[in-house]
Amino acid sequence: MHLMRRVAGALMLGALAGTAHAADPGITDKEIKIGEVLPLTGPVSFAGEAHYLGTKVALAEANATGGVAGRKVVAVTEDDGYVPARAFQAAQKLLAEGVFAVTGTSGTSHLNAMMPLFIEQKVLTIVSINPAEQAYNPVKKNIFVIGTDYGNALYAVVKYAVEKLGKKDARFGVIYQDDDFGANNLLGYQRAVKDFGLKNVLEIPYKRGQKDFSAEMLRVQNENVGFIASGGIIAENVAIFKEAKKLGLKDLRVGTVWTAHLPIVQQLSGEAGDGYYTADYMADLSDADAAPFVEVAKKYLSADEMKKVNRYTMASYSGASILIQSMRACEKDLTRDCVIGQLESGKKFSVNGATAPFGFSPSKHFSDSPVRVLQNDFKNARFVRVPE
Amino acid sequence: MRAGHFKQSYLELVALTDSGAVKAWTAMLLVGCMALPWVASSYVLALATTILITAIGVVGLNLLTGVCGLISLGHAGFLAIGAYTAAVLAVDYAVPIIPGIICGGLLAAALSLLVGIPSLRLKGLYLAITTLAFTIIVTHSILNLDWLTRGSAGLSLPAADLLGISLAGKVSFYYFSLAACVLFVAAAMNVMRSRIGRAFVAIRDHDIAAEMMGINLVAYKLMAFALSAFFTGAAGALAAYQVRYINVDSFAVLVSIEALAMIIVGGLGSIAGAILGTIFMSLLPEFTRWLFDALGSGLTETFSTRALEVRGLIYGVVIMTVLRVQPDGLIGLWRDAKRLWSNWPFRY
């Protein structure tokens, strides 16, 4: 019995000692492991794959220049199939494997499922795929979000329509999804209507998953709307563009948020979508600002992989890149606390032009990146930044 | 050695088993399950919890499809009803976990009558399409009843506790799920050994003949739907407590198809088959990942974003191979192994 107690005591002491000196998970003498949960299969796999490639570029770039304090940075990627329950399971797997940080957090509902785990286990998390408000408001010590509010993006396109397209006296309308995403869009639109004194004639909510927008666009036609703010995602935007063309609404201008800043929307819309406006905090690949990023991406990705690169690649590159920059600044004390300290130090991080330089502070873990308005140039398969 | 199954009373007929060996093996399995938290990593434990919860729903589907012969693609809907019932009760009314699970199961069972009634006239693919429509109606209703379900934003559940013990931890929730799984599996086994289960089998084999024997088709078909939906609804409620966040994305039609695949791969009509199918299909993605890793880290690098597609192909090929080699499913494989063991060195 005494022997048992001694053994148990020794084991407990050993465990305590181990805890006191243990480094954060995911760090060994040779490598630093980071994790990602991405929708690599399922309806938005184009976003997950693009995100995966962005992290791959950032890590290859870092490892080619010595890694972090001589350690190679490696990523463990889990697929959630865009199902929240699977995202939760994948997050548990990452935590069991031991990751220093997480840079891929799938969609909003998926992040909602995973976030309690990340908070509970104090995992440094950089949200770059989807700037969900729940992740930064209120501030969570270990979670940082790159991006801006959807409302800001829609505000920017309406502002552009007023100031540059001469639509001040036009009749305005908005089509928005009846959820948090849509509510955010609506707020941005309503703010613009108020700020610029616009004639708001239509506010049409639609149910998530809606595919047919013929009734909505007929109302747009009947109300003689000159500019419609579209709060669609992928298929919704495509349907809106096609319906506008079908109805012959030549004078109608459409503005969207960054969900339409994607080759897939451009391709599916075809000529019907030519000229639509979209606002994004990420640069377009054809933009001169993004040239350094494109150069790095071409260096580390195959031609086949380059075809899958889009704004989500730039977003994830930004997230992984600032993590690496912060880890490098903590070479002597490579702990999550130190890296968090670096991230919220207020210094501006530059990410090869993928997005404008940004930073965080202890009271603001949200980059609130500036938005730029882009126009779809269907013929040349690119989005052109409009003069501000 | 056992030489037959001679029974002298109805009580003996409905008993779950009279074999000492089966009892001993079952006890060992339970001890193994109880010991798992001591040896498994947190991820393995989470995976095991998911398997236990999935098994409850799949055993429920097996009662309807495997035992009673009524195909359902509506079980994602029952799962959603159970999950949302438990979540709404927990969030808005602070209802504890066990009443939440029971209410989830009961509401799913009540609503199953909506699809159960058409089943009286429909069979096969026609019934499958009707039940598929049910799932679509459920998911659309969840999206539209914002005041109750919070629409597409979903619901975050508080951590549950049971008699003052927090179920927020992985180990405690694993034990809770294990207890629930054992309870539901025992209930399903009892149902199958009873008059109700035998009536289900009779309906599956030939419903007109069953009716001629005095089985009330209306009552038993509806009972099969209600029982199956109760199991699935309870599994949904448990799943909601496990993830502690639900939204409509978790209840796509694919979930119903996966559940059907589990009972087919495991072996239709058998509870052990349903459980084996659940374990097999849940671990198969892990196996394909392990295979990829075992073949060298360069492989993932080479395939890049196509790695998941290749793993998906392997997943499909393994399922096809299993069904080609053993059309009776994994339980058929198990029965063959048992027969070989009992008869060796003779073939028969």
Image (cartoon, coloured by chain):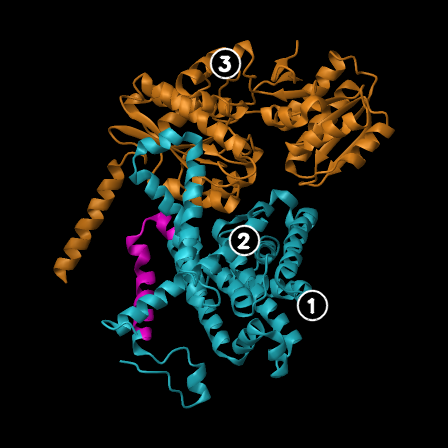
Chain colours: A orange, B cyan
Is A386 left or right of A11, judged from the image as shown? right
Judging by the rendered image, the residue that carries numbered circle 1 is B121
Measured in 3D between alpha carbons, the distance from the residue under mark 2 to the one under mark 3, in whole angstroms, is 45 Å
Judging by the rendered image, the residue that carries numbered circle 3 is A353
Residues packed near mark 3 inside 10 Å, few (<14), some (14 to 19) or many (20 plus): many
Marks 3,1: beta carbons within 8 A: no
Give the chain letter at badge 3: A
- Image location of residue A60, percent across then percent down: 36, 21
Measured in 3D between alpha carbons, the distance from the residue under mark 1 to the one under mark 2, in whole angstroms, is 23 Å
Whether residue B282 is visible, yes or no, is: no
Q: Name the N-terminal-most of marks 1 and 2.
A: 1
Q: Quick check: do tags 1 and 2 share a chain?
A: yes
- Image location of residue A43, percent across then percent down: 56, 38
Query: Secondary structure beneath disc 2?
Result: helix
Magenta range is B22-46
- Front tag of 3 and 1: 1
User: Is A363 above or below relative to A180?
Assistant: above
Whether residue B79 is visible, yes or no, is: yes
Q: Quick check: do tags 2 and 3 share a chain?
A: no
- Front tag of 1 and 2: 1
Task: Work out whether residue A16 or residue A279 is closer to the camera in this orientation and state it.
Answer: A279
In the figure, residue B213 lies in which quadrant?
bottom right
Give the chain letter at badge 2: B
Give the chain letter at badge 1: B
Marks 2,3: beta carbons within 8 A: no
In the picture, the quarter occupied by the N terminus of chain A is bottom left
